[in-house]
Amino acid sequence: MGGEVRVLLLLGLLHWVGGSEGRKTWRRRGQQPPQPPPPPPPPQRAEVAPGAGQPVESFPLDFTAVEGNMDSFMAQVKSLAQSLYPCSAQQLNEDLRLHLLLNTSVTCNDGSPAGYYLKESKGSRRWLLFLEGGWYCFNRENCDSRYSTMRRLMSSRDWPHTRTGTGILSSQPEENPHWWNANMVFIPYCSSDVWSGASPKSEKNEYAFMGSLIIQEVVRELLGKGLSGAKVLLLAGSSLRRRERGDQPHSEHLRGLASECLSWKLFRECFWTPRVLGCSHLYSSAGGTGVLLNVDRVAELLEELGYPSIQVRGLADSGWFLDNKQYRRSDCIDTINCAPTEAIRRGIRYWNGMVPERCQRQFKEGEEWNCFFGYKVYPTLRCPVFVVQWLFDEAQLTVDNVHLTGQPVQEGQWLYIQNLGRELRGTLKDVQASFAPACLSHEIIVRSYWTDVQVKGTSLPRALHCWDRSFHDSHKASKAPVKGCPFHLVDSCPWPHCNPSCPTLRDQFTGQEMSVAQFLMHMGFDVQTVAQQQGMEPSKLLGMLSSGN
């Protein structure tokens, strides 16, 4: 397709979006509102249009201009993007491709080289670096067990050559409306140290724990691949994906994971079916916590290397744990049953873990483990961070020994769950940018349904876009939200899944979808008792549950 035709197509689409009804038009960040459009330029002007042939910064899409015609709009945007993409005879490649680190001294647990997956977006000055999650190990015994059952999380030897991004890593505008055209980087988790370690493998140390160093080395390498010209670097992190194309775990891996489940049948449902009750303990939030531990260090590294103008921000999904008292205390045998404080206390010594310097200064020597908990490290961070957290996080309930499979929950468990939501809500009070639905779930930003969940009528992608807009006139996160564009969104309803937009739950045995009322009954919810506690009639309570209010 000729350059003249491409430019005219773009002008035509922009003119169509602007419409004749006074709606907003697209504009690049920092531009003044557009004046009424002049007559279309003659075709011969297109070949000397300003910036022709030069990289153009990507920009988020303002969908207020296309309400009611979203599907058609997205189809045209995708087609236009493909036609304008360099070497446009080829289709856009949506896969992220594997690059093993050139510095082979920075390794996974087993000494194999660490690496990253990259999908470049020529012309975009926005970079998204995503940290994978997947629990951790904190002594030789459970690291050996992890290596025999979850080897992909400790070695790069069997990593696939490509990965396909979903959620915020998707290249589809309809799935990822504001970051679809960014440079995407997926950093696999193979250090088992919550991205905190700085300890190489040696004769004394059977395993390397180099999570923090892996992040720094990836950033160094990306500077030579275009990151040096970035305007924004968003360090994001979430949990281990259940399954991706090309990510085929071998049978002993599956059975090892299944040993932590109630049964092989349930494990298969956990691994292949989203949102089945009782699957939380297969996944963790090492990626989200890793963001909190490393976002300032990434900014400091870029400043040291001579790139102080790159704005570094964080997006921590499901990594905001509480160091609360367990529902039932258990011995610290493995990562599933060990209380979070004790597991991290042991782990940080084993990994030679690093925490943000400003947070470390808040605690005396030997108590640096406190910085792994979001509500303690967040006030010390220099970089702005957006916190995404379910109020009833499955992983938090798991480490608190609240199990939602098998027998119905007891009244004490139910009260504990409600109190957990209140406690977590309280810790988010002073977090300026947050999205916290009252759902029983775990991680969201890499889910294809991440656009569906809402808090107070605002979706997560929309809230992130509003947060991004708050930086346009100032690099500080203290700027108030634009009217009608909020980014501090915390549910106030008191029960798990009281938000009607929560992800669908399924019965662990039948696989059938469950309504909120069915789910609570499944948990042993006593309508009479809870209605009395809330001071309302049982019929009114059932009506609220049925409507999702």
Image (cartoon, rainbow, N blue to C red):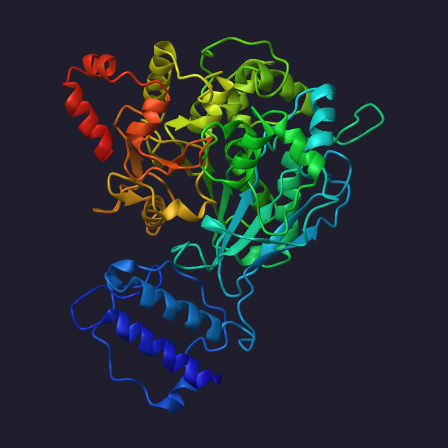
69, above or below 165, in the image: below
Q: Quadrant of the C terminus?
A: top left
Residue at left 64%, top 14%?
333
Foreground residue, 56 or 322?
A: 322
- Residue 52 placement (x, y as % from top left): 46, 78
Foreground residue, 7 or 311?
A: 7
- Residue 209 visible to an observer of this rendering: no
Foreground residue, 472 or 404?
A: 404
Q: Is residue 286 left or right of residue 390?
A: right
Q: Is residue 425 left or right of residue 349?
A: left
Residue at left 57%, top 14%?
342
- Residue 360 placement (x, y as % from top left): 54, 22
- Residue 384 placement (x, y as % from top left): 42, 38
Question: Quarter of the image holding residue 32?
Answer: bottom left
- Residue 450 visible to an observer of this rendering: yes
- Residue 113 placement (x, y as % from top left): 75, 43
Residue occupying the far front of the picture: 510
